[in-house]
């Protein structure tokens, strides 16, 4: 007799779960002793009969295959089937299992493996979420080298005369055309000032395509603490500048940041780091592939500016934040409290 929709769905889920567990032997409990499996022409074996024989055949295929596959329940024209994927950098569909008849005990009597491209491509997964327990694969989270999203990971540490002790950029969120960028600095002395400038509220500090926004005195000591620069980065994208404007800061970013946004610049401005010495219009060079962050100013000029530099007045010089500000190290040292 024909299986019901619910029976087909249970079969598809069982095949997916046990197949992903590489335990095809357990499928025998779902198969009639007289079960018959029809194979595609590519197998040149025709049909296989007997529940135990079929389960053993599927188990042997799993054990001998060098293809990493993943199964999940799907719908083909409203009919539950089991969809098999070939996993790799780009997952591709291999075939589907269709359940055609059941015996009087409700076990699978006839089913077929189908590799017809039209049917395979039309099958739609039952569950679209990535946390489907039947299809979840930990390698989606922690990937093997062979299927990595990036050869070098999602973060890059940049060094240069602007960040002698390093700066951090989330490379995975940078548009390819911004991986290398050079432009004039537009200096802001706080996150709040930067937001006004990016939104065009400060006449002489309007941000234009090609600029490099510099937000300083937002490091551990300068903040005090490190504000998350979420608002400025969001405004840059919102103003349509995400692919033409970079941002550097001695403040920090969260994991949700996207764009050419470089943070944790060390030493920070409040301790006399180079980010505190640059001036409006200085050319900033960003070369993420080569891990470089530089200001196009000579060492002699930077030394001259450093001799003239004086630390700004503390934003908070009382209470716990005052003590924190006096004792905190920069981001490169972990922003820990340390006595000189």
Image (spheres, rainbow, N blue to C red):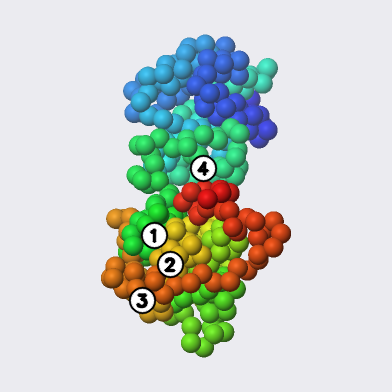
Mark carried by residue 3: none
Mark carried by residue 123: 4
Quick check: marks 3 and 2 in contact, CB under 8 Å?
no
Q: Is residue 3 above or below residue 57?
A: below
Label 1 or label 3, whichever comes before in sequence order: 1
Where residue 90 appears, as percent x and y from the top left, is 40, 44
Q: Which residue is mark 2?
A: 275
Query: In this view of the protein, which residue sits in the foreground, 291 or 318?
Result: 318
Q: Is residue 224 above or below residue 3?
A: below
- What's the CA distance linking mark 2 and mark 4? 56 Å
Query: Residue drawn 62% across and 23% down?
Result: 102
Label 3 or label 2, whichever comes before in sequence order: 2
Q: Is residue 46 above or below residue 301?
A: above
Q: Which residue is mark 3?
A: 282
Label 2 or label 4, whichever comes before in sequence order: 4
Label 2 or label 1, whichever comes before in sequence order: 1
Where residue 250 appears, as percent x and y from the top left, is 49, 62
Label 4 or label 1, whichever comes before in sequence order: 4
Quick check: marks 4 and 1 in contact, CB under 8 Å?
no
- What's the CA distance linking mark 3 and mark 4? 57 Å
Element assignment for label 1 = strand
Question: Among all residues in the image, which is located at the extreme right?
Answer: 319
Q: Which residue is mark 1?
A: 163
Query: Residue drawn 51% across and 42% down?
Result: 123
Residue density around tag 1, few if under 14, some if 14–19, many if 20 or more, within 10 Å:
many
Where residue 225 appears, as percent x and y from the top left, is 60, 58
Quick check: marks 2 and 1 in contact, CB under 8 Å?
yes
Number of disc labels: 4
Query: In this view of the protein, which residue sits in the foreground, 48 or 292?
Result: 292
Element assignment for label 3 = loop
Quick check: marks 2 and 4 in contact, CB under 8 Å?
no
């Amino acid at each position: 007799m024909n299986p019901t929709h619910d029976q087909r769905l249970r079969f598809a889920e069982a095949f997916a779960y046990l197949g992903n567990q590489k335990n095809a032997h357990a499928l025998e409990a779902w198969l009639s002793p007289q079960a018959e499996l029809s194979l595609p022409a590519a197998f040149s074996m025709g049909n296989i009969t007997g529940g135990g024989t079929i389960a053993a055949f599927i188990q042997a295929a799993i054990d001998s295959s060098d293809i990493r596959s993943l199964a999940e329940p799907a719908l083909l024209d409203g009919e539950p089937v089991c969809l098999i994927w070939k996993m790799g950098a780009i997952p591709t569909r291999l075939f589907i299992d269709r359940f055609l008849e059941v015996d009087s005990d409700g076990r699978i009597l006839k089913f077929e493996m189908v590799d017809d491209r039209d049917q395979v491509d039309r099958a739609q997964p039952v569950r679209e979420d990535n946390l489907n327990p039947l299809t979840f694969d930990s390698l989606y989270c922690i990937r093997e080298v062979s299927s990595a999203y990036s050869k070098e990971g999602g973060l890059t540490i940049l060094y240069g005369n602007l960040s002698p002790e390093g700066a951090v950029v989330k490379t995975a969120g940078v548009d390819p055309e911004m991986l290398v960028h050079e432009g004039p600095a537009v200096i802001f002395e706080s996150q709040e000032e930067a937001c006004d400038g990016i939104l065009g509220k400060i006449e002489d500090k309007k941000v234009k395509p090609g600029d490099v926004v510099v937000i300083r005195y937002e490091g551990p000591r300068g903040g005090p603490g490190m504000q998350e620069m979420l608002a400025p980065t969001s405004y840059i994208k919102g103003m349509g500048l995400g692919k033409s404007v970079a941002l550097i800061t001695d403040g920090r970013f969260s994991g949700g940041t996207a764009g050419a946004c470089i943070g944790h610049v060390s030493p920070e401005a409040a301790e006399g780091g180079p980010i505190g010495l640059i001036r409006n219009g200085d050319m900033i060079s960003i070369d993420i592939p080569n891990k470089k962050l530089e200001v196009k100013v000579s060492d002699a000029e930077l030394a001259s500016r450093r001799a003239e530099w004086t630390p700004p007045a503390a934003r908070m010089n009382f209470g716990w934040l005052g003590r924190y500000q006096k004792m905190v190290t920069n981001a490169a040292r972990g922003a820990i409290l340390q006595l000189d």
